[in-house]
Image (cartoon, grey):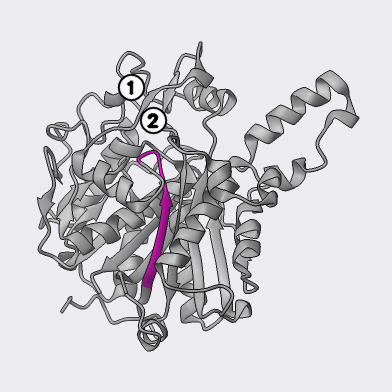
Amino acid sequence: MVGRAGGRAAGTGPVAVTGMGVVSPAGADEYGLWKALLEGRSTARTLGALAGLPVDFGCPVDGFDLDEAVGGRSVYRMARFVKLAVLAARQAVADAGLDPNGWDGARVGVVLGVGVGGVSALVDNARRFDAGGPEAVSPLLVSMMIPNAAAGEVAIALGAGGPSLAPATACASGATALAVGRDLLTSDQCDVVVAGGAEAVLTPLVVTAFTRMGALSTRTAEPALASRPFAPDRDGFVIGEGAALLVLERPGDARARGARVRALLAGAGSATDAHHPTAPDPEGRGARRAVEAALRQADWVPADVGHINAHGTSTPLNDAMESGLIARLFPHRPPVTAPKGVVGHTLAAAGAIEAVATVLALEHSLVPPVANLEAPAEGLPLDCVTGGPRLLRAATGLSHSFGFGGHNVALAFQRA
């Protein structure tokens, strides 16, 4: 039994995670992701599409034909991030044992966080416009580039006629989507919510933009070692792509239909730094408010947190802020992991992919190691898991997500 954090707010009980789908640089399903996380195996590599750039590597989704996996004629109108989202959504719904042909679609919601959208389609059509004028621009450009295209296409694919939302909170978008999805259930607006995030911006323009702002690792000679959360020599994040969707239901509804409950999303908290467009508040005040809100909603005290899935970007500023936050709030030193060492920073998809990782850690009673880390940098007082997975005896986990603009989200998961 977890402790009390001032009493749970009315109408905010836990919701059940009954299905998960993920397409990540580690593979096209949760099994590939989990295997790579347990091995601490980075997926970063040099990419031909980025040849000649100051940073020419990233963590791509590859190894299978995405168009073939999505299938159908509608694939021609989808940007890459939308295809990733549709594939992950199908997995999640199938994993939940739900049949879209048999549910009341008006009571099914989709909340799908995307930070950027179809930038490749936009750049390609800008070039066409410059070369051939207005007639060269695709009539599908608008529907391919808008960030909410993923939420719309997933709703179409699933026949989901409830709320369809596309929160854009930068790198916290996937976690924001899960928090919003939880609210749709606890407020009785939906009976099922498919929520998560997607992003696919491994393009020369976007990679160059992040490089120019100094956010990316420049370890071009050894890309597999470049994403190293909390390490003394961390020098920036490695950009990745992917999508993850989770099916959320009220626990009573899940039990009534005999569903497998994979975990409980016990609480979610959000807060804003109001500090700087891209740099986190060094004191982590907004992040702390988000964590405390999640604990309050879950009816936990800090000592109830059994492990932490850190945002862990491998950037000097984020890792310093986050480690200080964890040390101040959790003096019992719960074990910390950071999946971005393996899959890179998948931007809007990160919070959802890491939610999947947190649920898997609770299911398997294992905390994966932080890739490329021997020990945290001096002054970062964390109990990071290194070398190999660690047995997790606790039944709870907290996942952090932070985004440009000062967005902070914390998700509190509990073993079912």
- Residue 63 screen position, x and y as percent: 43, 35
| Residue 275 appears anywhere in the view | no
Question: Mark 2 and mark 1 in contact (Cβ < 8 Å)?
Answer: yes
Q: Is residue 394 magenta?
A: no
Q: Which residue is mark 1?
A: 223
Q: Residue at x 48, y 22 (%)?
A: 211
- For the stretch drawn in magenta, the main secondary structure is strand
Q: Amino acid at mark 2?
A: Val
Residue 22 rendering spot, x and y as whole percentages? 41, 52
Q: What residue sits right under mark 2 in the picture?
A: 238
**Residue 370 appears left or right of 26:** left
**Residue 66 drawn at (x, y percent):** 53, 42
Quarter holding the C terminus is bottom left
| 25 magenta-colored | yes
What's the magenta region? 17-26
Q: Against 242, is 245 above or below?
A: below
Up-down relation of residue 357 to residue 60 (above or below): below
In the image, is 134 to the left or to the right of 213? right
Furthest toward the top, the residue is: 52
Residue 123's x, y, as percent? 69, 29
Q: Badge 1, how many Cα within 10 Å: few under 14, some, many 20+?
A: many
* Relative to 200, 97 lies left or right: left
Q: Nearer the viewer, mark 1 or mark 2?
A: 1
Asked whether 344 or 215 is in front, the reply is 344
Q: Is residue 94 visible?
A: yes
Q: Mark 1: which secondary structure?
A: helix
Q: CA distance from mark 1 to mark 2?
A: 8 Å
Nearer to us in this view, 154 or 100: 100
Q: Identify the element where label 2 is drawn.
A: loop
Which mark sits nearer the N-terminus, 1 or 2? 1
- Give the amino acid type for the residue marked by disc 1 in the picture: Pro
Residue found 47% across the figure and 66% down from its top:
93
